[in-house]
Image: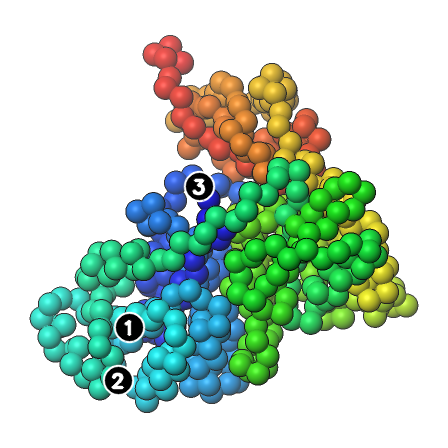
Amino acid sequence: MQTRYPIVALVGRPNVGKSSLFNRLSKVKKAIVDPTPGVTRDRHYEQVTLEDHVFILVDTGGIESDKDEKMTGLIREQSLLAVEEADIILFLLDGKDGVMPEDHEVVDLLRRSNKPVYYLVNKVDSPELEQRMLPPFFELGIDKLWPISASHGFGLKTFFNVLLDALPIFAEEEAVPEDVIKLACIGRPNVGKSSLINRLVGEERMVVSPVSGTTRDSVDTELTVKGQKYLMIDTAGIRRKGKVSNKLEKFSVMQALAALERCDVALILIDAGEGITEQDTKVIGYAFERGRACLILLNKWDLVKQDKKRQKQIMEEVERATNFIGFAPVITLSALTGFGVAKLLSTVREVYSQYAQVFTTGKLNKVLQDAVEGHSPPMHQSRRVKFYYTTQITSSPPTFLLFVNYPKGVHFSYYRYLVNQFRTGLKIDKTPIKLLLRERKRKQYD
């Protein structure tokens, strides 16, 4: 297994077709659809599977936006972000609009990046249009242009074959023992990620052991506390200061995505002084969709320790923003003073024990039976939905396969009821769980 998946970033001016290409790629394969709602649908990053190749696709237009900023500067900063964090960059140009002044600036920036860059001329719907639209773009000094139509699919199959061949394969990391809990510290710059790790390592007087990592310039840290081994995946300090603007220091989604692919438990750090942001919730949503356990850490709590009204306000904001992962524990702490840090790892151990737990088939079917008896399944096309049996197909997170005669007849409200029943019956209240519905062929008398 790769240590992480490659990151492919879409860069370009507004309305050149980034979203259309993103949507076409991200919908290529959805093998198992988890009907659990609540995760924001306007995210701008997605794990994509294309002909057995897996990568993370990022639409940089959705990472940072500022209506008060001049568009040229915004596009340049989005491009800088892609250059810093992505493995491959797709620069979209608008075939109908032709070459724009800002295109020259971004092409020059990308050319100096030493990153693989593919220049796609979008809105080219036919070979005839290709002959007319492509020539003006050669003034950018680009050797190879890829004519495509994100909306209609023209040229995409040819380009996808080239893209898949170019995806880097990251070497397998050294086998991490099963009893090692992999933690990723996620959060905006200056929220206290490094301070928290240093506090954990320093308090236990452990020797920091560098472990081969995959994220540029990052060093994972091994930590042992009370006999439990941890691998701390730090996303702080990756970006080289001086090479990016202050605007980009607000947050790097791509840093977080790479770390989330490798961890068991995501520690989402929130600055108590600033509160939770939309970008924070998007990353939490991605962690949820990837099936990672989460802890919400309200750091710098010492800044509001004397303000009970502000404390209540912060907690209410976090609860509203993270209601779709109500199972995730919320911990108030201060990496600076050490307040609350002691209970962090004990909570991590509790969460991980649930996250990695395996249940017997008998236990699972007893929970399912009790749930069905307690609340009868709905009707579907004048027939009663029937659940036959269930089994656990994986842990981390606990994932259960339920065989049913009419999967499409299971309304969301009943699905949610089943999730709650499994949580209660199995006593797993601090980790994500997944219920997958599979149709079992019905007998004629069903």
Frontmost residue, 249 versus 3: 3
* Residue corresponding to mark 1: 119
The residue located at (44%, 41%) in the rendering is: 33
The furthest residue to the top: 445
Circle 2: residue type: Leu
The residue located at (52%, 22%) in the rendering is: 390
In the drawing, does residue 65 fall left or right of residue 195?
left
Vertical arrangement, residue 218 with respect to residue 105, above or below: above
Instruction: Answer few, some or many: residues within 10 Å of disc 1's Cα (few below 14, many 20 plus, some between 14 and 19).
Output: many
Q: Quadrant of residue 422?
A: top right
* Residue corresponding to mark 2: 140
Report the Cα–Cα distance between label 2 and label 3: 42 Å
Circle 3: residue type: Val
Q: Nearer the viewer, mark 3 or mark 1?
A: 1
Q: Describe the element under mark 3 as helix, strand or loop.
A: loop
Q: Position of residue 67 (x, y in %)?
A: 51, 81
Say which mark, if any, is on residue 33: 3
Cβ atoms at labels 1 and 2 below 8 Å apart? yes
